[in-house]
Image (cartoon, rainbow, N blue to C red):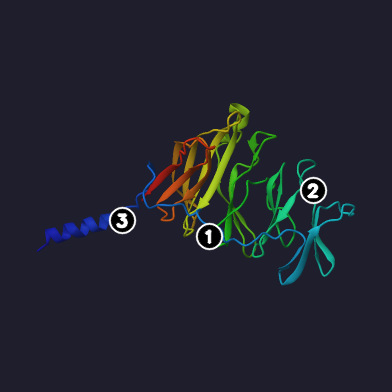
Amino acid sequence: MLNHCGDAAVIVFAMLVASPAQKPILVPVPPPRGESSIAAGPSREPEYLMPPFTISVNGKAMSIRNADADNADDDVLTATVSGRRVWGIPPLSAGGTETTFFMKREWNVLLADQSRTGVMFFDLSTGMPMSDAGYEGMVVSPDGKWALLPPWFSWLSECFVDSRTLRLTLRGQPKTKVVETMPKSESCPGQDSERRGFENVAFSADGKYYALVRAGQAYEDGLVGDGVVKLFQSSDDKELTSLKIKFPPHCTSVEFSKSGNYLILRDEPEAGRRDETQWLRIMR
């Protein structure tokens, strides 16, 4: 004889197990009590290395220094091993500010920042560029093993110089992966609407998730307008959810709360203006 109640319970349980996990959503909420941003407090990150310095690469001591102005290869930076030149980096741009090179000792890449290119990055072992375009900067994961590079907006072209956000490994062989590509309609906001592009990324404290935000910022008054917030899973770079929303007018960044249950669109107004920082509850 069948136990109908027991059989029904088994069927319901099987349906629950088989059903896909509910997609998280982002919900605007007032600032919650007892929550704070993981950005609060002093940074414990090590200092950047800047030329001249010596670092171990593939088991050999590599010396990296600014090149002499009259060097035969017309480089601005050179690397030598046992006194022998192994690579050189030429000028990044014919104009703009002087290039600043920097890295951290545990990284496998060297970064270069210049006003007309944004942040470029180079394979430390070969000196070869790893992208044709510049980026806004590099946001390192909590475990220090990889980083995200949001695209850089060029005032000259009034466009993002690349439509892609990259993931970059910082240990072992340097590799890149595209984790997000902006629509073509968002790549050149300055040409159509007199505004610059604004993109920012942040990690949760445990590194399991990261957020990406993108919006437009008016040239005339610097106010940020409508934009999009996206949440990703770090293990496979899967986009979990997104939300189109009006950003705080003086938004400068996105942050996670310490609990990981909220995203924060940080507003930094001038003195005397109301702080309109927006909190988003991650409903899982």
In the rendered structure, which amino acid carries the disc numbered 2? Pro
- Is mark 3 in CB contact (under 8 Å) with mark 1? no
Point 63% across, 43% down: residue = 152
Question: Residue 96, relative to residue 234: is it above or below?
Answer: above
In the rendered structure, which amino acid carries the disc numbered 1? Pro
Mark 3 or mark 2, which is nearer to you?
2
Furthest toward the left, the residue is: 1
Image mark for residue 91: 2
Question: Which quadrant is home to the N terminus?
Answer: bottom left
Image mark for residue 172: none
Question: Residue 198, relative to residue 1: is it above or below?
Answer: above
According to the picture, the residue beneath numbered tag 1 turns out to be 142
* Nearer to the camera, 55 or 266: 266
* Nearer to the camera, 56 or 42: 42
Describe the element under mark 3 as helix, strand or loop. Answer: helix
Q: Left or right of 70: which side holds 118?
A: left
Image mark for residue 18: 3
* Nearer to the camera, 10 or 225: 225
Q: How crowded is mark 1: few (under 14 residues within 10 Å), some or many (20 or more)?
A: some
In the rendered structure, which amino acid carries the disc numbered 3? Ala
